[in-house]
Amino acid sequence: AQFHGHLGPWATAGARLGMAGLREVEAKGYFDVRVICEGPFVKPPKSCFLDGPQVGTGATLGKRNLSWVKADAIMVRVENTQTGRQAKVCPTPKLLEVLSSFKPHPKGDHARAADGDNRRDADHVLETLARKIAAMPDREVLTVSHSGP
């Protein structure tokens, strides 16, 4: 939440996939890891996913060890640059179902709410979904395959 600006489900999902990849390749993160995110992350809320692997792996756009490739399916590729060990982490259908369960309202609907109740309600729903994703067991959130040494 501190990095992304709020506790959202897409960023939480990205963090979960990134952390799983980091564990799988047995990297410490930050400087011994390379991460490639694949997916339809053109605009929010889906693009929020890209903040998650930065938090979950320590790879960042600034260090140039994190990149995004536009694709139809979501996958996080993680490589331990010291050992060459690689992992592919994909969301499960259940995670994709949870992510698609929130349908944001057009921005105009929020702006019309003079007291901000609609915005607070939407934020509460987003945070609830994010916490649900954070608490789900790995087997319900992601699948991992690995290659390399």
Image (tube, helix red, strand yellow):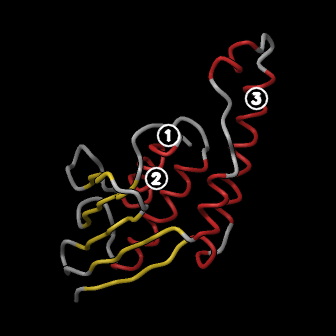
Q: Quadrant of residue 56?
A: bottom left
Of circles 3 and 1, which is in front? 3
Would you say the residues marked 2 and 1 are in contact, meaning their CB atoms lie under 8 Å apart? yes
Pointer 3 with pointer 1, Cβ within 8 A: no
Q: Secondary structure at mark 2?
A: helix
Eyeballing the image, is 79 above or below 1?
A: below
User: Where is residue 90 drawn, in percent x and y?
Assistant: 46, 70
Q: Nearer the viewer, residue 115 or 6?
A: 115
**Picture quadrant of residue 131:** bottom right
Residue at 44% x, 37% y is: 43
Badge 2 density bin: few <14, some 14–19, many ≥20, Cα 10 Å: many
Quadrant occupied by the C terminus: bottom left
* Amino acid at pointer 3: Arg
Q: Which residue is mark 2?
A: 52
- Quadrant for the N terminus in the image: top right
Pick whichever of labels 2 and 1 is earlier in the sequence: 1
Where does label 1 land, which residue?
4
- Give the residue type at disc 1: His
Q: What kind of element bears circle 1?
A: loop
Percent coordinates x, y for residue 31 in the rendering: 23, 61
Callout 3: helix, strand or loop?
A: helix
The residue depicted at 78 percent of the width and 10 percent of the height is 114
